[in-house]
Amino acid sequence: MKLQFNRLVLLALPLIFFVACDEEDKEEANSDALIGTWSMAVTEYPNTTCTGDGEIVDEGTITFTATKVTITYTSTFEDWCEGTITDGVCDEGDYGTSTESDFEDYCAYEQGTYANGACTDVNEGDYNLTDDSITISLNETLVIPESYASMCVAEGGTYANGVCTISADRTMAIVIDGNTATLTYTDIDEDYPEDSYCEVTVLTKQ
């Protein structure tokens, strides 16, 4: 019986090797296909099925090299306002009003660059790609007073010269189809299911 079992193991080795190589080839093909610059649009859905009426929450570009990723977000005052704009004033109801200058201040607070009515925020990091998922690791920065430095450290970040830096990882399902790639992220809140949501990022090769 032991000899027969050993024979079965030996017979299975070529199949295991073939499957492993096939998966490796797929990952390498995906990695090659991903390299370059893509236009990016992120749509958020208030459910975990990624269906229904979604809202575009981010737009910009994303660039992949063999190991690095650079994400550039671009937003305007109109994108930032979550209410109605009348005569240059954003009215968000119970949340008050804001103007273009408030948006410019917010852009600086987020470490972005404001020019020609648009805020540009650039994030760089690493990524790891498998056959059906991608994990993007970015360093998020936030300007905060020194009195909040302990909170930054408590969240796993580092604080220096008024800036809190926190490393953030996000794993998403990915499907690459020629010049289009779709990344899907689902956040399930066990305590408050009504706060669960889905984000679908559609990339288009430039």
Image (tube, helix red, strand yellow):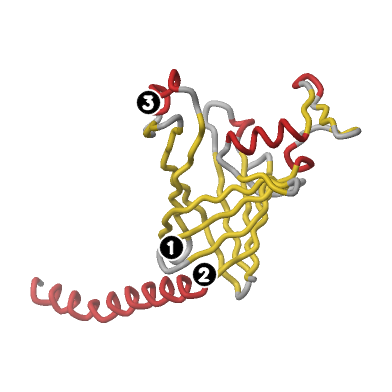
The quadrant of the image that shows the N terminus is bottom left
Pointer 3 residue: 154
Q: Residue furthest left?
A: 2
Q: Secondary structure at mark 3?
A: helix
Residue at x 41% of width, y 24% of height: 149
**Residue 37, located in which quarter of the rendered image?**
bottom right
Pointer 1 residue: 129
Pointer 2 residue: 34
**Residue 182, located in which quarter of the rendered image?**
bottom right
Q: Secondary structure at mark 1?
A: strand
Residue 21 in picture, x, y percent from top left? 33, 77
Q: CA distance from mark 2 to mark 3?
A: 35 Å
Q: CA distance from mark 1 to mark 3?
A: 30 Å
Residue 96 falls left or right of residue 86: left
- Callout 2 crowding tier (Cα within 10 Å): few <14, some 14–19, many ≥20: many
Name the amino acid, label 1.
Leu
Name the amino acid, label 3.
Ala
Pointers 2 and 1 in contact (C-beta within 8 Å): yes
Residue 205 falls left or right of residue 127: right
